[in-house]
Image (spheres, grey):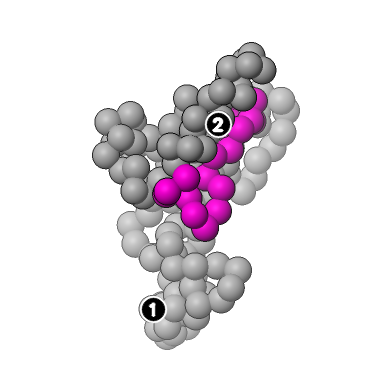
Amino acid sequence: MSAWCKLPYWRKSTHHVLRIEYDVHKIEQLRNSVDALREVYEPFSRNHNKVVVMDVRSDELTKYAANCMLATKVSFMNEIANLAERKGVDIEMVRKGIGSGPRSDYQFIYPGVGYGGSCFPKDVQALIRTAEGIDFDSRILKDVHLHP
């Protein structure tokens, strides 16, 4: 099982599960495990399917990509806050305007000291190293890393 946070926290937060990723290698394990997971989490996922079945490599990239996207949102809002300050614009009004649209929300769009925690910095760095390992220049991630 690939929970996106440490297992003790994951157990405590079953009412607030954002996404569950589960990978198995044998087809018979897959069918039985996915059915069991869907049954367990059905009460918590009435609005959308939170059980995602994928291979291990896709799971790893998904976890890194999700955290990097959120880190990018934080860095982006800090950039907009700096621009707003120089233009004499109220960043809180801008933030509310951005968050009110149907394609975005209010999560992770608060300007501040940057992103931190145990996952965002290491996941941004890990995805940069992954890209470098296949000779891919991930300019956006490098910028996010340099300007959290």
Q: Residue at x 61, y 24 (%)?
A: 31
Residue span colored magenta: 42-64
Is residue 146 among the parts visible in the rendering?
no
Residue drawn at 63 percent across, 16 percent down: 28
User: What's under tag 1, amino acid-wise?
Assistant: Glu
Q: Is residue 19 visible?
A: yes
Is the residue under label 2 in contact with that under label 1 (CB below 8 Å)?
no
Residue 35: give its label: 2
| Labels in figure, total | 2
Q: Is residue 19 above or below residue 132?
A: below
Q: Is residue 73 above or below residue 3?
A: below
Image side of residue 52 versus residue 119, left or right: right
Identify the residue at image location x=42%, y=48%.
43
Q: Is residue 65 left or right of 106 when viewed as pictured?
A: right
Q: Amino acid at mark 2?
A: Asp
Q: Position of residue 137 (x, y in %)?
A: 69, 37
What is the crowding at mark 2: few (fewer than 14 residues within 10 Å), some, or many (at least 20)? Answer: few
Q: CA distance from mark 1 to mark 2?
A: 45 Å
Pick whichever of labels 1 and 2 is earlier in the sequence: 2
Between 134 and 16, the one nearer to me in the picture: 16
Tell whether position 53 is magenta.
Answer: yes
Residue 67 rendering spot, x and y as whole percentages? 49, 44
Residue 95 percent location from the top left of the image: 45, 75
The residue at the far top in this view is: 26
Circle 1 or circle 2, nearest the eye: 2
Give the structural element (helix, strand or loop) at label 2: helix
Which label belongs to residue 92?
1
Which one is nearer the viewer's eye here, 99 or 92?
99
User: Element at badge 1?
Assistant: helix
Above or below 54: residue 89: below
